[in-house]
Amino acid sequence: MPEFLFGTELKPDAATPKFGIVPLIWGTFMVAAGSSMVALPIGLLSAIYLSEYAPRTLRSVLKPTLELLAGVPTIVYGYIALLLVTPVLKRLLERLVEVETFNALSACIVVGVMIIPLVSSLSEDVLSSVPRALREAAFGLGATKFEVSTRVVLPAALSGVFASFILAISRAVGETMAVVLAAGMRPQITLNPLTSIETMTTYIVQVISGDAPYGTPKYLSLFAVGLTLFAVTLTLNIISGVVLRHFREVYQ
């Protein structure tokens, strides 16, 4: 158990197999953190625009269009990363650094785009539920539209917005096919996003689709990795529920 939880080497096919899960956890949170840097600000800004600035007719078109991104199969995002995002990165960065065909940055970009609708839709619903009386009171005191949006509406809906962030991160942690095609399958601990990494979901796919005989340590390790992934996502969802329950604003 200590070797599994704290080991930094994952070599299930070696003469002396090693099943350290730290490289998989590192890769998983690397993708989650990178995709969050893409999705959270864009999703929140789009939610504020839809809730506070967009005319009703434009909002009725933009919101469903944005939510269509959530209906695109994740394997399509993976192929977009492999065939479009990575070549663009290579063209932009080829004179500075080497960009591998499978790299974490491409995975972060496409997963970030994929979870934007989750952040935007949930945050927009929360922002729209803030009572209009708060907005009118702020306008009555001479506040501008921007000040009302950022200093009145957003703080009033902060618990729901934060919960949407956690749910989006949880979604990124559990993403599979887009990461398999974009990030590759090299378990390593690195800070370089232009190299290949491996996540927990990718490892599960690799073992299931490989030639690991039933009942071998390598085959059984996927259940341990799956249980760890379940524990991580469950923890994130519990945190989201706690935030909503303890910090939710209730208006009469």
Image (tube, rainbow, N blue to C red):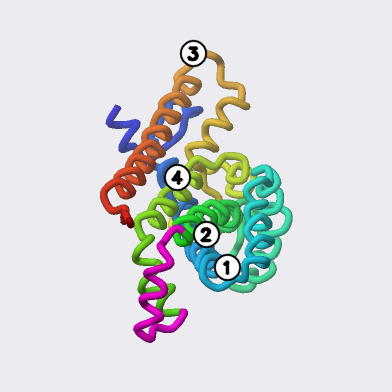
> Residue drawn 36% across and 74% down?
151
Query: Which residue is identified by label 3?
Result: 215
Q: Earlier in the sequence, mark 2 or mark 4?
A: 2
Q: CA distance from mark 4 to mark 1?
A: 31 Å
Query: Which residue is identified by label 2?
Result: 39
Query: Which residue is identified by label 4?
Result: 170
Q: Quadrant of residue 23?
A: top left
> Residue drawn 47% across and 26% down?
222
Residue 85 placed where, x, y %? 67, 59
Q: Tag 3: Cα neighbours inside 10 Å, few (<14), some, or many (≥20)? A: few
Q: CA distance from mark 2 to mark 4?
A: 13 Å
Residue at the far bottom in the pictured view: 142
Three-letter code, disc 3: Gly
Q: CA distance from mark 1 to mark 2?
A: 25 Å
**Of discs 1 and 2, which sits in the foreground?**
2
Residue 238 higher or lower than 97, as above or below:
above
Q: Tag 1: Cα neighbours inside 10 Å, few (<14), some, or many (≥20)? A: few
Three-letter code, disc 1: Val
Magenta part of the protein: which range?
129-145
Q: CA distance from mark 3 to mark 4?
A: 30 Å
Instruction: Give left or right: position of 224 versus 114.
Output: left
Q: Nearer the viewer, residue 174 or 162?
A: 162
Q: CA distance from mark 3 to mark 2?
A: 40 Å
Residue 41 placed where, x, y %? 48, 65
